[in-house]
C-alpha cells in the first residue's frame, strides 16, 4: 500500500523505540541497564488505582463528554487556581489521551501550512513531527551555546511575519533546565507584540530541584495568559503514563475547536482513567513530594557519576528526571550519538537515548527514573566501555 507523504516523513519516537528494545533484550535474559525511560519507575499511588477500580465497579464504563468528565475539569480548574493563581472555567479545559494528545490537538487547531512555530532546541522529540503534521514549519532555536537557556534575543532573531507560536517546556525534556523568569517575561512580551500563541508544556513542573521555583508565563499578565495554553497531565507527576490522561487549559474558543477535533477522532479519554485522574489531583499529594526528593537524590548521584567519565560535560539538571551530558569527543569517533548509543548497548548492555532526536547530536540522554544501584552500575559500565577505546 502507498503510505501518504505526510506520514512517510514522520520518524517514529526514538525514545519509545529504545524502551521497546530494552524490554526485548531483558526478555532474552540479558542484564541490560536502561537509561531510556521517559516515565517514573514508581507505581501509580494506590488511592488513585482504587478509585478507578471502584469507578469500573460502579459502571463508569460508558462514553463521557468528549472533552472530559465535569468532575475532572473542575479538579483541573481548582488545581490551576491553587498552583498558578489563574481562574480557569471548565470551558477553558479539555482532557485528552495524554498531554501528547492535547499538544497534537492544539497544534492542529492553531497551525497550518505557511505558519512557523518556534521550538527551542534541544527539544522534546515529538514537537517538530507534530508541528510538521499540521503543515506548519518547526523553526528551532539552538540554545546549546548558552547553557541550554533560551533568551529573548534568540527568540527575537527567529521571529518572522510567519511566526504563529512558540513552544516552551520548562523544566525541559531532555535538558532538565528551567528557563529564567526574566527572559520568559521578555519572550512573552515578544509573543504579544507579534500575536503569537504560547504553548507552555508544564508536564515536569512538579519535579523541580534545589530552590529553583517553577515559573509559568501564564502568570505574567492577563494579556499573556489569554494567549497561553498550559499543557499538563498525570503521567509524570503521578506516575500514570499508561493511563493516558492529559489536558490543555486556554482560550475557550480554541478549546472548543480542539473539542470538535477530538469528537471526530478519539472521542473522550478512557472513562475510569479520568476518575483516577480526579483522585490524583484532589487526593493526598505527599507521594509527589516524596518522589521529587528521590529524583533529586538520584540527580545528584548521576551527575557526580557522569562527571567521572573523561570527556563528558554535564550541568546539573534543575528539574525533570533527565540528564543530558555533552559527549562531543565520543560522538566524533562514532559519527554521531546514535553510533555511540549503539556501541554502549552492544558492548556494555547500557541503553541511552542518542541526542539526534532532540536536536542535539552531540549529547545523549540518560533518564534517572531508575534505581541508585542501576545508576551506579550503568554509569560505571559506560565509563569502562569508553575507557577501552
Ligand atoms: C515534554 C513532554 N511533554 C509531553 C509529554 C507527553 O506526556 P503524556 O502524553 O504521557 O501525558 C512528554 C512525555 O514524555 C514529555 O516529555
Image (cartoon, rainbow, N blue to C red):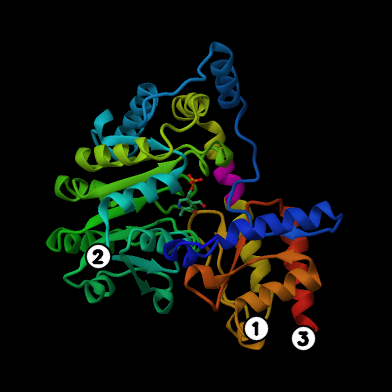
Relative side of 127 to 356, left or right: left
Image disc number at residue 389:
3
Q: Relative to 46, say whether 295 is above or below.
A: below
Quadrant location of the N terminus in the rendered image: bottom right
Residue 177 appears anywhere in the view: no
Q: How many marks?
A: 3
Q: Tag 2's secondary structure?
A: loop
Q: Residue at x 59, y 50 (%)?
A: 295
Q: CA distance from mark 1 to mark 2?
A: 37 Å
Q: Relative to 333, say whether 89 is above or below.
A: above
Task: Pick out the residue farthest to the top.
Answer: 58
Task: Pick out the residue farthest to the front.
Answer: 1
Q: Earlier in the sequence, mark 3 or mark 2?
A: 2
Which of the two marks, 3 or 2, is nearer to us in this view?
2
Task: Pick out the residue farthest to the right.
Answer: 29
Q: CA distance from mark 3 to mark 1?
A: 10 Å
* The stretch drawn in magenta includes residue 7: no
Relative side of 48 to 307, left or right: left
- Depth check: 359 or 46 in front? 359
**What residue is pinned by disc 2?**
115
Image disc number at residue 330:
1
Amino acid at each position: 500500500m502507498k503510505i501518504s507523504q505526510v506520514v512517510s516523513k514522520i520518524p517514529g519516537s526514538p525514545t519509545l523505540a529504545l524502551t521497546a528494545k530494552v524490554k526485548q533484550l531483558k526478555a532474552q535474559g540479558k542484564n541490560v541497564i536502561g537509561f531510556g525511560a521517559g516515565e517514573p519507575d514508581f507505581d501509580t499511588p494506590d488511592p488513585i488505582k482504587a478509585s478507578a477500580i471502584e469507578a469500573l465497579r460502579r459502571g463508569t464504563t460508558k462514553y463521557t463528554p468528549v472533552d472530559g468528565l465535569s468532575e475532572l475539569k473542575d479538579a483541573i480548574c481548582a488545581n490551576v487556581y491553587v498552583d498558578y493563581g489563574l481562574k480557569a472555567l471548565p470551558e477553558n479545559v479539555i482532557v485528552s489521551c495524554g498531554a501528547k494528545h492535547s499538544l497534537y490537538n492544539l497544534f492542529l487547531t492553531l497551525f497550518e501550512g505557511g505558519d512557523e512555530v518556534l521550538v527551542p532546541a534541544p527539544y522534546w522529540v515529538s514537537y517538530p513531527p507534530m508541528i510538521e503534521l499540521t503543515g506548519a514549519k518547526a523553526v528551532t532555536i539552538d540554545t546549546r551555546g548558552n547553557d541550554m537557556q533560551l533568551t529573548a534575543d534568540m527568540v527575537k532573531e527567529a521571529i518572522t511575519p510567519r511566526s504563529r507560536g512558540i513552544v516552551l517546556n520548562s523544566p525541559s525534556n531532555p535538558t532538565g533546565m528551567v528557563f529564567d523568569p526574566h527572559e520568559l517575561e521578555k519572550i512573552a512580551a515578544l509573543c504579544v507584540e507579534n500575536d503569537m500563541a504560547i504553548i507552555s508544556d508544564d508536564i515536569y513542573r512538579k519535579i523541580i530541584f534545589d530552590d529553583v521555583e517553577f515559573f509559568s508565563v501564564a502568570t505574567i499578565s492577563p494579556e499573556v495568559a489569554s494567549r497561553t495554553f498550559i499543557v499538563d497531565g498525570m503521567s509524570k507527576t503521578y506516575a500514570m503514563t499508561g493511563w493516558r490522561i492529559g489536558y490543555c487549559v486556554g482560550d475557550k474558543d480554541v478549546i472548543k475547536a480542539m473539542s470538535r477535533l477530538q469528537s471526530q477522532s478519539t472521542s473522550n479519554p478512557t472513562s475510569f482513567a479520568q476518575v483516577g485522574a480526579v483522585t490524583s489531583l484532589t487526593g493526598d499529594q505527599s507521594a509527589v513530594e516524596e518522589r521529587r526528593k528521590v529524583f533529586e537524590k538520584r540527580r545528584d548521584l548521576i551527575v557526580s557519576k557522569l562527571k567521572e567519565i573523561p570527556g563528558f560535560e554535564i550541568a546539573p539538571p534543575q528539574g525533570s528526571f533527565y540528564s543530558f551530558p555533552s559527549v562531543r569527543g565520543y560522538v566524533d569517533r562514532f559519527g554521531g550519538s546514535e553510533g555511540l548509543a549503539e556501541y554502549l548497548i552492544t558492548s556494555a548492555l547500557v541503553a541511552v537515548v542518542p541526542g539526534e532526536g532532540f536536536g542535539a547530536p552531540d549529547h545523549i540522554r540518560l533518564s534517572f527514573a531508575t534505581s541508585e544501584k542501576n545508576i551506579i552500575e550503568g554509569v560505571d559500565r559506560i565509563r569502562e566501555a569508553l575507557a577501552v577505546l
